[in-house]
Image (cartoon, coloured by chain):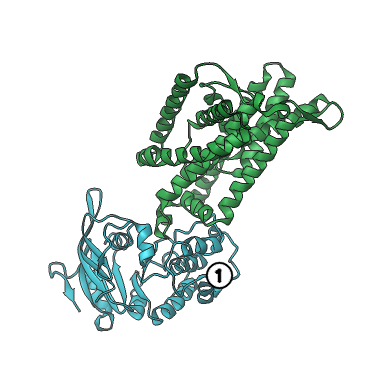
Chain colours: A cyan, B green
Amino acid sequence: MSLLKVENLDVRHGQLQAVRGISFEVREGETLALVGANGAGKTTLLRAVAGAHQPSGGRVLLEGVDVTAVPAYRRVALGIALVPEGRRLFAGMTVEENLQVASANGRPGPWNIERVLDAFPMLRARFKAKAGNLSGGEQQATAIGRALVTNPKVLLLDEVSLGLAPIAIDLVYQCLETLIASGATVVLVEQDLGRVLRVATRVACLLEGRVVLEGAAAQMTREQITAAYFGLNRGAGRQSA
Amino acid sequence: MIWINQIVQGVLLGGYYALIACGLSFMFGVMRIINLAHGDLAVLAAYLVWAIVDHSGMSPFLALALVLPLMGALGWLIQRLMLERSLRSGMLVPLLTTFGLAIVIQNLLFVQFGADSRSLAPAIGDLAFDSWSIGGQIYISHLAGLTFLVALLMLGGLQLLLTRTPLGRSIRAIAEDPDTAELVGINSRAVYAAAAAIAVMTVAVGGTFLGMRATFAPYAGPAQLIFAFEAVVIGGLGSMWGTLIGGIVLGVAQNVGAQIAPNGFLIAGHVVFLGVLGARLASGNTRRRIRALLGRAA
């Protein structure tokens, strides 16, 4: 059985329909990468799965249980955690407090603050620093750690490399690859196709709110994804690789 | 020596202003609501304490212990039934909502208790007029000293709550970013309601001290709101210790103003308030201009 299942999800921003009937499944231990141009609906889709946007149609199921109407804060306790685009840390609070506030509301499990500090050693020296004073890489590590201390069953990562220096991206991805190798279930939104093909088990490409290409990462080529990304196969419908 | 005395009395008066203002500051800091019913809630608490004291003869401090949970429940209800709904409609609607609430409280108090002024001073015995002499014609009233001490304890308690407890961290997280707070598992509705309950409980303490140091009547709330608002603006909206500093600055300005001219008490306070507000606005504009210039240069 799939751990996370999205069925015919529609999400609107007022008059604009950002997500149109998207369906996908993620099995335990899988990493699904969502790729697509800006405005394709990736962030909206992740936020709808996390409960931050109420869908106008369709369902979100976690371990077969319909959580579509469950508010975002309760989805965290059920095992869905989102690392939002732009990190969205509580800037006036310290790294420690950012982790504490999430840890207090999560599920019991192996992840605690100490384990986050082991996973992201760069945070140890900055533990008492205000999150707003951290570098981009440190902020991203804190944001991922903040999601991890809730012990999610599914970790949703939205553009973790956005706005980071290359060296910071490498550090964050080193940690992510270790996390994925340990069996974490991840849904990842990312623009960097090279990294996507390296870490993902499966890839889904979104265009104008729809999935236009989906398949195993190992069977996809960069050219296939790029063509779907820019809508060069428009009219071909949803393709499987 | 007169000037020193006025400054000392101003500092002590600032303690009262901080006491009455900390709930206003707390509520703004968390929910970004300027509660225009703040002063009226203080007067309502004073009336509740007075009614219990009048019927039972118990100490106002014991009566306050009974009133605190009632006011906490009222704060919770106000948040859940009124503010929560009005907050969805932008910044202006909560202002109008609390303005309406203020009018309702004033008129209910008028209907129930009439227009006569009341005071809790007769119920606190010697505390109402005893004082310590600290030499050179300078006296510190026991009640003013106690008020200042309670203000320190309450602001310190709120600061500890915000920094050392899970509830406090949740409150600060929501104050910074309510959407993201929900995404880390915080039930913002419950936390907002708890914060409103705490804020209204602090108002009850302020209202009780108002009743002990002065008289109050059903329409006395707006005057308390003005002093509380001035203290909060001078000290910085949402800052706990800033509220104490704001209260002290206001109290000292009023007492020094009263020493300069008989009607200078209120005017001096308002002038300092307007001066600080103007300076903050001007520095904000300057910062924006500098940022715009730097942006253009980049």
Residue type at tag 1: Leu
Would residue A11 be found to the left or right of residue B123 on screen?
left
Would residue B159 be found to the left or right of residue B36 on screen?
right
Nearest to the observer: residue B217 or residue A240? B217
Residue B185: image x %, image y %? Answer: 41, 59
Of all chains, the one bearing label 1 is: A
- Residue B282 higher or lower than A55, as above or below: above
Nearest to the observer: residue B183 or residue B91? B183
Which residue was labeled with disc 1? A123
The reply to whether residue B46 is visible in this rendering is yes
- Residue B37 higher or lower than A157, as above or below: above
Identity of the residue drawn at 60% across and 49% down: B159
Would residue A117 be found to the left or right of residue B259 on screen?
left
- Residue B94 higher or lower than A146, as above or below: above
Q: Residues within 10 Å of mark 1 (few under 14, many from 20)?
A: many
Instruction: Indicate the secondary structure of the residue bearing disc 1.
Output: helix
Identity of the residue drawn at 57% across and 51% down: B161
Residue A48: image x %, image y %? Answer: 29, 59
Nearest to the observer: residue A10 or residue B278? A10
Q: In which quarter of the image is residue B22?
A: top right
Q: Quadrant of the N terminus of chain B?
A: top right
The reply to whether residue B226 is visible in this rendering is no
Would residue A192 be found to the left or right of residue B61 on screen?
left
- Residue B168 higher or lower than B252, as above or below: below
